[in-house]
Amino acid sequence: MNTFTIRAISVCSGLILGLSISATAWSASSLEQVMKQRGLTQKDILAAAKTYTPSGGRDEYMVFASGGQSGQLIVYGIPSMRILKYIGVFTPEPWQGYGYDDESKAVLAEGRIMGKDITYGDTHHPAISETNGDYDGRFVFINDKANPRIAVIDLHDFETKQIVVNPLFKSAHGGTFVTPNTEYVMEAAQYAAPYSNDFVPLEEFNDKYRGGLTYWKFDNDKGRLVQEDSFTFELPPYSQDLSDAGKGPSAGWGFTNSFCSERYVGGNERGRPPFEAGCSAKDTDFLHVTNWKKAADLVKAGKVKKQKGMYVIPMEQAVKEGLLYLIPEPKSPHGVDVTPDGTKIVVSGKLDSHTWVYSWEKIQAAIKNNRFEGKDPYGIPIIALNDTLHKSVNVGLGPLHTQFDSKPCVAYTSIYVDSMITKWDYCEGKILDQLPIHYNVGHLMTMEGDTVKPDGKYLVALNKLSIDRFNPVGPLHPQNHQLIDISGDKMELLYDMPLPLGEPHYAVAIKADKLKPVVRYKSGWNSRADEKSPYKSRAGREKTERSCDANGKCSVEVYGTTIRSHITPEIIEVTEGDTVSLHFTNLERAEDEVHGFALYGQNVQLSIEPGKTASATFLADKAGVYPYYCTEFCSALHLEMQGYLLVQPKGYKAKAGGLQAGTNYTEADYNKQVETNIATQQVIDQVVGFITSHNYQDFPTVVGLVEDATDQLGFAKGAKEKSEAAAAKQDWNNAMLWANQWWQYQVKTADLGLRAKTHLEENGAKKVK
Ligand code: RUQ
Ligand code: CUA
C-alpha cells in the first residue's frame, strides 16, 4: 500500500469515528423507537417521507428565492428544502469572488447610482425567462426595490451577468415580470418622484412627481437587457405596485396595480396626518392596463421620444394611442396575477377580504366600445368596475398574492392578516379549502405557478415572521418558508425551513430537469462577459510582463494558472508603486475542482472554477511581503498551494546567492521517495487499466477526468526526468525534491483516476476489452 492510500484511509477512519459516536443513539432503534424518542406522530413520519431526500438524491424542483436585503438570490430544492446556493447579485459575495475580481466588479459597477457604489439590494421578485408562457430555464431576473435596478442571472452557470439601473425611477417594487416570450421584463416604480435628478418641492407632487412602468427589452440571443430599446409608460403618481403580463388572449397587455392613488403626501413634521392615513382613505385604487405590443410598434415607428436614454411614452400620448386604461380595484391592493389561460386577472386588496376576478373579455369589450365611467385627473380613461368584474370572493382578511394549480380554475391566495392559505375556485367563486399557517404569509408559490402550465404538487408559504418556530438566535429571526402538499383535495403542511439571509419576498420554482448548467467553462473564459478572456493562459505559457509609460507609471500583468496543487507563478516580484493585475486560469477539467486565490491585505479573493480566468487589479503602494494561497480545499496538498508577492522598494537590488536551504536530503531520502513513486505508479496503472478496458469515452465526466489525469501524468514525467538528472549529478537535494514533485503529480493522477473509476462503476460502464 502506498503512502497516498494510507493517508486517505486515516482521514476516513477519523470521519467514521466521529460518525459512530453520534450514531449510537439511534443505531439499534426501530422506527417505532425513534418516533417515541423524538416524539414524532404518524403524520410527521408521513411528512418526512414526502420530503426526505436520501444522500445523493435529487430534488424535483429548483427554487429561486429573493434574498431580500442581502441583494442575493437563494437557490433551494423541493421537496427537500435543502439550500444549494446563494447567488451574488447586487451585493459582493466573497465565496464566488463576486465583487472581488475585475470581471464581476465590472458587473457591480453597472449598478452604481449617481457614481455611488450601492452594496446592498432590496430584492423582491425573481422571474424565470419564458418561451410561449412557460419557463424555459435560461435566465432569472430580479429587481432591487430601493435602488431601481434589475439583474440578469444566466442559468447556464448561475452567475449574475448584468445589472441595469432605471434612469427615471427612484424606487421600483413591481419587478420583475416577463412577457410570454421574454420580449420584455416589466418594472414599475413604487414611490413617485421626479424623473429628473433635480430638487422638486413636494408642493408640486401632482404635477411633477411621476410613477411609471418600464418595459425593459430583453435580447434573448445575447441574454442582456437593452436600455436603448426599452420604453417607459409615464404614469400618475399613484404608487404603482406589482404587475403581471397578459398571456393567451391577453398577451400583449400588462396589468399593474397601485396604492395611494389618493396622491396623498404625509408629513407629520408639517402638521399633516401621516402617509398611511391619507393613502388608504378612498375605497378603491387603480389597476393600470397597458398595451405593450402597440407601444412597441409606436417606438419602432419612431413616434416616441427619449428621456435620459430611454423611450418615454407621456400619458397624453398613451391615452391618444389607446395604450393605457385604469380600472378601480379594491383599496390598497397588493398582488395582481393573470390566470394560466390568460382570461382573468386576480387582484387582492390588502385592506379588504376579497379577491377580485376581472374578466379580460369584459375589459376588452369596454375598451372596444369606448365605455368609460370617466377620466382620472390626468385624462386616463377609467373603465367601471362593474363592467369588468367576473367575481369577487371572500377569501379571508388581508389577501396578498395568488398562484395557480395544475387543476383548472383552482387558485391559492396568501392571507396575511389571518395567516392562512385559501384554496379557491376562481371560475365559480367558491372557497375549496383553508389551511392555517404560521405568521404572516406574504407571497406564496406553487410549482411553475405563474406560467401557462402550472404543475401543482407543492406550495410554499413565504412567511414574514418565524417567532417561535426555530431555536432562538437573538432578536433578528430567520424567515420561514413552509412547504405544503397540494396534491390532494386538502392542503397538508410538510415542513418549515428557516431562511437566514434577508427577507425573501417572492420565489419561483422550476422543474429541475429544465435546467442544464455547465460543469466547466471553455478554457480561459471570462464568465461575466461570457467571452474568451484576453488574459487566459495555458500550462507552460505563464508569464509576467512589466511595462512603464512616459510618466514612469508602471504596471505588471501576471498571466498565471492554477491546477492541483500549484499556483503559477509561485513568486511574483513587483516594485512599490506598480499597478498589479493578476490573471489566473484554472486548468482543471475535473468537475468541482475550483481553486481560490486570496492575497494578504489587498481585498483580493478569487473563485476560479474549472476553465475560468479571473483577474484582480490593485495598486502595490507599499513595499512588503504578501503571501497568497488557494482558498478552496482542492487537494491533499491544498495548504501547499501558495506563493509570495514581493513588493520591492524602489531601487531594490537582490543580494547575490540563491534562496537559503531548508532541509538537506540524502541519497537514502531520494531512494525511499523513488520506491514510493514506483508503488504509486502501480496503483495508477491498475486504475488506468480499469478505465481503458471500459467504454469510458461514453462518459463526458470521465473523459474530462482522464484528460486532467493525462496532463498530470505528463507533468510527473517532466519532474521524474529532472529528478533523475539531479541524481546523476549526485545533487541529492534537488533529486529528492523533484522526486517528491513527481510523486505529487502521481497523487493527483491517482486521485482523478480513482474518481473516474468510481464514476464508471456507479454508472454501469461496460467492459470493452
Ligand atoms: S411584495 S408580500 Cu411582492 Cu415585495 Cu408582496
Ligand atoms: Cu487549490 Cu486549494
Image (spheres, rainbow, N blue to C red):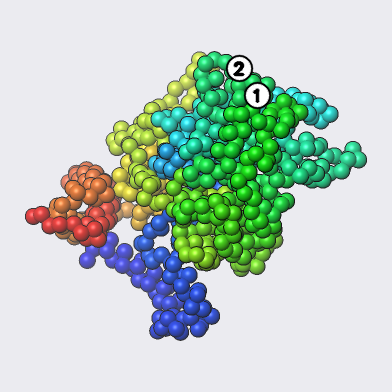
On screen, residue 622 above or below 731 = above
Give 398 or 561, whichever is nearer the viewer.
398
> For mark 2, what is the residue?
305
Q: Give the mark nearest the N terminus, 2 or 1.
A: 2
Q: Image check: 358 left or right of 448?
A: right
Q: Give the residue displayed 44% in from the left and 22% down from the top.
A: 547
Question: Considering depth in this image, is 725 or 596 the residue closer to the camera?
Answer: 596
**Dot 2: within a 10 Å radius of its alpha carbon, few (fewer than 14), some, or many (20 or more) residues?**
few
Asked whether, in this view, residue 357 is left or right of residue 719, the answer is right
The residue drawn where x is 49% and y is 61% is 486
Locate the N terminus and report the quarter of the image it occupies. bottom left
Which residue is drawn at the image coordinates 59% and 54% (left, top)? 429
Q: Quadrant of residue 308?
A: top right
Instruction: Identify which amino acid the numbered label 2 is placed on.
Output: Lys
Displayed quadrant of residue 177: top right
Question: Between 190 and 734, which is closer to the camera in this rendering?
Answer: 190
Comparing labels 2 and 1, the label whose residue is closer to the camera: 1
Which residue is label 1 attached to?
Answer: 319
In the image, residue 188 lies at what x, y percent? 62, 35
